[in-house]
């Protein structure tokens, strides 16, 4: 944001807002509100007839300038005027832009920045230009950014920010900025100090029980200073962020001014009020009561978009500029009507459908006292929010469509709040649950209730036919529940409450399956019994003779059906609604069945329809901590949910005999589970509790209990067994952590002659038999070894040993430095806590000789360190003569100086001086280099 200077010192506060003019192009009206000092800066304010905006891309690119004329100047009070500058700007393309302005200068005397009288005023707004955002507007601030505070008293201000689009707002603190004249450059003002402790580091809060604070509530925007300690003028800045559907679409910087004075006056107090939620069409009435501890007279003022007024409190008369749709809220009495303490104010607002939105409406009520002329005027704020919700849809009914594809025709009453873009969402689920919902207390969550959205229609539609997208709905035994709700388009957003439920089923003319129960578990000789009902009509109502055809598919969701039984019937009292399916692999497979019913039409067997498929119950078991976890499932047309299922365990030493150990209340299919810890929880047939052994196997079967929801199908409860499944429990006892030791390093052995290319670390540990609480440690099956190269590094597993091996060599290292720990792991893959961490460091000594003889006799010809250089990460070694002239330099840790200069010239015998800057490989990642200085006698 650039700063373009104008006149002298007069600007106290301000912000930039913007709104899109038309959805035909990307033209925005950009508005700057500034508040001018009309006492010390009157002449400058008189001359400030225009400002220059800088408009630039948020990232990269050059800026453009825009001249904006002053279109309004009006008094806020005797000392301050509101000035509005406005101009239109057409953006060339979508993107993120920064709109900024700089004006020379701020008013004099601001104590928490340096030289305010010569500091340009600067604010900026970040605007996201995107056609999908529609006629987007930035939030506007309706409470002027000027306030007064008293030393020692908590001060609060709220900008009364309002977003006409219904976007969500959040708040965060910033720092006032200054611009560079004639550029788009800006920076923080010089010498800025935090109001709370920047002027007086010992400042305390109002209650004197802690340091002073300066904060902003990120949700409500309440800016509070608890409490001022030094009188003067302060400027602060904060940012209002605009969010839509979880994405930030802009932000506005507000720079405001607070005048702090000392005195005996105390601020007035407003009684708190609760937030409000109402259904559109209701009237909101809130009574405010304020008292003044000094019995001063008081005046009320109210701020918020619901009043549809400008920042100076004037009504907005142009419908295109309106903040909300009529009707508008009122507050009485007006600010021109002082009251004695206690003062009473009344807020009223008749809401309607146009006010429905997801975001609440925030209202700020301000009460100011009217003390004697010698005292500073003080104020208090009370904020509350109003959520306007839509009514729930009513009149939902359903009836069978009677079409060839089975379905329902839904109808409902025309919706009351048909806002632009609103849609009615239609939800369906199997089964009826009842319950009603209301907008403010419990609007209802269709997904949580088990519903699936099947369609959306415009809000003016009152009917919908559901035939499952042409696939048809299930007939016979299935009850369908429907609800609807209204979803409003962004940016207003939000939803209505769920409608009341309508629930019914589709009648069927064919039998229904009732049982698919596993009688025998075997991989070759398994047996399943399948049962069904007769069709719901008397013989002769539909011409016979008749036939059942039972088909089977492998798998709970199998679709490759094959006919396994064809049964002719006269619908008499014969045992022809049962089939025992033999020689199956029930050990490894579940099975799925369906029944097709035939009648005779013109002498030919003709299908009247096929039942919904039903699968066998499939049981699975897995080891659990000192027990066995069971889970089961079945895909059937009846309802196994919200029933009590039964779990059986095979009696020890009596193969094939199962004892009922638990009755399990279940809800949804995800609750078809049971953890057996050996306790028999059904004692009516005796107590068969056992103590589990991890070396034994235990066998189970489960019996599900189900029923059809439809009152048309009177079959009572349906009982079906799973196959037998066997499993072993596990032991979840965590092993104990080992106790680790690491072989020590003897630095006295680390000489040049004893300097290996690679080194290794040897780890040894012991495994305890008891833990710290004297409990047995679980047996360890393996041990994991972990390593980190530094004391602050991340540990990685580098190896594993199999018990009883309790040692490990970490080899191939170019350094001893590192840290280790070991864990124990049981055969059930339970890992212990880490052992003690043991670290080893390299030798950090670098000893150099004081004489060498480079005479090519093969003895002491090179100047080398006396210690092993393996531990050196880097070295810079420099040799000087007695006059300080550099003769030789190397970065080789072994040095290998042969008595020659760097360009290969032999140096004379004598004394030379060196400096070695050495950085060692250590476990400390930020270890500093060591500087070693000394001398060496070169003898030839």
Image: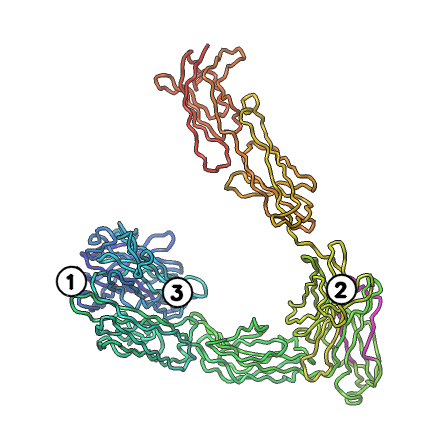
**Predominant SS of the magenta segment:** strand
Q: Mark 3 and 1 residues: CB-CB less than 8 Å, in contact?
A: no
Query: Residue 404's image quarter?
Result: bottom right
Res. 39 mark: 1
Vertically, is 288 above or below 901? below
In magenta segment, residue 908: no
Q: Position of residue 485 (x, y in %)?
A: 51, 77
In space, the residues marked 1 and 2 are separated at their CA atoms by: 91 Å
Q: Is residue 557 visible?
A: no
Range of magenta residues: 576-597
- The residue where tag 3 is placed is 219
Kindly identify the residue that appears in the image at 28 percent across and 74 percent down.
290
- The residue where tag 2 is placed is 700
Helix or strand or loop: what does disc 2 sit on? Answer: strand
Give the foreground label among 3 and 1: 3
Judge the density around disc 3: few (<14), some (14-19), many (≥20) Cα neighbours within 10 Å: few
In space, the residues marked 3 and 1 are separated at their CA atoms by: 36 Å
């Amino acid at each position: 944001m650039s700063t373009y200077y104008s006149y002298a010192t007069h600007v106290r506060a301000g912000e930039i807002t913007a709104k899109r003019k038309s959805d035909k192009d990307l033209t925005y009206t950009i508005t700057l509100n500034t508040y001018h000092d009309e006492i010390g800066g009157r002449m400058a304010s008189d001359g400030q007839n225009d400002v220059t905006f800088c408009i630039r891309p948020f990232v990269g690119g050059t800026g453009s300038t825009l001249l904006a004329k002053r279109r309004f100047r009006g008094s806020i009070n005797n000392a301050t005027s509101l000035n509005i500058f406005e101009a239109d700007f057409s953006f060339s393309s979508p993107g993120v832009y920064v709109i900024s302005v700089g004006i020379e200068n701020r008013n004099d005397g601001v104590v928490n920045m340096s030289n305010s009288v010569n500091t340009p005023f600067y604010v900026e707004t970040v605007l996201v230009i995107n056609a999908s955002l529609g006629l987007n507007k930035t939030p506007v601030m309706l409470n002027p950014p000027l306030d007064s505070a008293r030393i020692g008293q908590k001060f609060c201000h709220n900008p009364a920010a309002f977003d006409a689009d219904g976007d969500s707002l959040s708040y965060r603190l910033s720092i006032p900025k200054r611009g560079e004249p004639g550029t788009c450059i800006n920076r923080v003002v010089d010498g800025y100090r935090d109001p709370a402790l920047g002027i007086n580091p010992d400042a305390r809060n109002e209650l004197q029980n802690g340091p002073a604070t300066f904060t902003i509530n990120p949700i409500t925007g309440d800016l509070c200073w608890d409490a001022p300690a030094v009188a003067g003028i302060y400027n602060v800045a904060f940012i209002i962020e605009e969010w839509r559907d979880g994405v930030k679409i802009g932000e506005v910087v507000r720079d405001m001014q607070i005048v702090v004075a000392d005195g005996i006056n105390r601020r007035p107090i407003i009684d708190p009020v609760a937030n409000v939620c109402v259904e559109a069409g209701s009237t909101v009435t809130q009574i405010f009561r304020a008292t003044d501890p000094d019995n001063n007279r008081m005046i009320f003022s109210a701020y918020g978009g619901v009043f549809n007024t400008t920042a100076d409190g004037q009504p907005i008369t142009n419908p295109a500029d309106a903040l909300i749709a009529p009707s508008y809220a009122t507050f009485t009495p007006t600010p021109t009507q002082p009251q004695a303490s206690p003062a009473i104010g009344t807020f009223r607002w008749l809401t309607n459908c146009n006010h429905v939105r997801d975001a609440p409406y925030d209202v700020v009520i301000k009460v100011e006292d009217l003390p004697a002329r010698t005292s500073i005027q003080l104020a208090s704020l009370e904020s509350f929010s109003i959520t306007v919700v839509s009514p729930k849809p009513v009149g939902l009914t359903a009836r069978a469509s009677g079409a060839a594809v089975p379905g329902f025709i839904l109808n409902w009453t025309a919706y009351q709040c048909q806002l632009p873009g609103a849609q009615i969402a239609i939800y369906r689920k199997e089964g009826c649950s009842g319950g009603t919902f209301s907008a403010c207390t419990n609007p209802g969550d269709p997904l949580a209730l088990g519903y699936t959205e099947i369609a959306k229609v415009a809000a003016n539609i009152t009917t919908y036919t559901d035939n499952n997208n042409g696939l048809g709905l299930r007939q016979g035994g299935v009850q369908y529940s429907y609800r609807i709700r209204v979803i409003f388009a962004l940016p207003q957003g939000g939803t209505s409450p769920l409608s009341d439920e309508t629930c019914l089923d589709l009648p069927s003319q064919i039998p229904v399956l009732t049982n698919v129960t596993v009688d025998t578990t075997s991989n070759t000789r398994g047996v399943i019994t399948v049962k069904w009902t007769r069709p719901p009509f008397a013989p002769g109502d539909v011409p016979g003779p008749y036939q059942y055809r039972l088909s089977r598919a492998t798998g709970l969701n199998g679709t490759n059906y094959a006919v396994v039984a064809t049964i002719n019937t006269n619908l008499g009292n014969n045992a022809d609604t049962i089939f025992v399916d033999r020689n199956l692999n029930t050990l490894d497979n579940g099975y799925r069945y369906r029944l097709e019913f035939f009648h005779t039409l013109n002498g030919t067997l003709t299908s009247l329809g096929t039942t919904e498929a039903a699968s066998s119950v499939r049981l699975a078991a897995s080891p659990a901590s000192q027990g066995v976890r069971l889970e089961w499932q079945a895909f059937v047309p009846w309802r196994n949910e919200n029933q009590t299922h039964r779990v059986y365990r095979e009696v020890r030493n009596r193969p094939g005999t199962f004892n009922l150990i638990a009755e399990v209340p279940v809800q949804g299919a995800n609750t078809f589970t049971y953890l057996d810890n050996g306790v028999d929880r059904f004692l009516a047939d005796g107590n068969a509790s056992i103590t589990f052994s991890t070396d034994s196997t235990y066998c189970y079967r489960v019996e599900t209990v189900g029923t059809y929801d439809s009152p048309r199908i009177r079959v009572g409860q349906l009982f079906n067994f799973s196959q037998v499944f066997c499993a072993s429990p596990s032991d979840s006892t965590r092993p104990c952590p080992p106790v680790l030791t690491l072989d020590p390093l003897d630095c006295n052995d680390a000489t040049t002659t004893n300097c290996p290319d690679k080194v290794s670390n040897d780890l040894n540990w012991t495994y305890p038999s008891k833990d710290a609480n004297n409990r047995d440690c679980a047996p360890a099956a393996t041990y994991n070894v972990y390593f980190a190269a530094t004391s602050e590094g991340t540990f990685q597993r580098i190896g594993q040993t199999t018990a009883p091996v309790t040692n490990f060599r970490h080899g191939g290292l170019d350094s001893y430095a590192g840290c280790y720990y070991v864990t124990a792991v049981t055969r059930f893959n339970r890992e212990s806590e880490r052992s003690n961490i043991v670290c080893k460091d390299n030798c950090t000594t670098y000893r150099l000789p004081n004489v060498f003889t480079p005479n090519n006799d093969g003895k002491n010809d090179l100047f080398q360190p006396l210690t092993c250089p393996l531990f050196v990460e880097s070295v810079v070694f420099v040799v000087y003569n007695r006059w300080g002239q550099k003769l030789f330099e190397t970065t080789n840790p072994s040095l290998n100086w042969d008595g020659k200069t760097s360009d290969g010239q032999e140096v004379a015998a004598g004394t030379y001086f060196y400096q070695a800057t050495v950085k060692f490989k250590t476990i400390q990642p930020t270890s500093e280099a060591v500087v070693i200085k000394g001398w060496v006698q070169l003898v030839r």
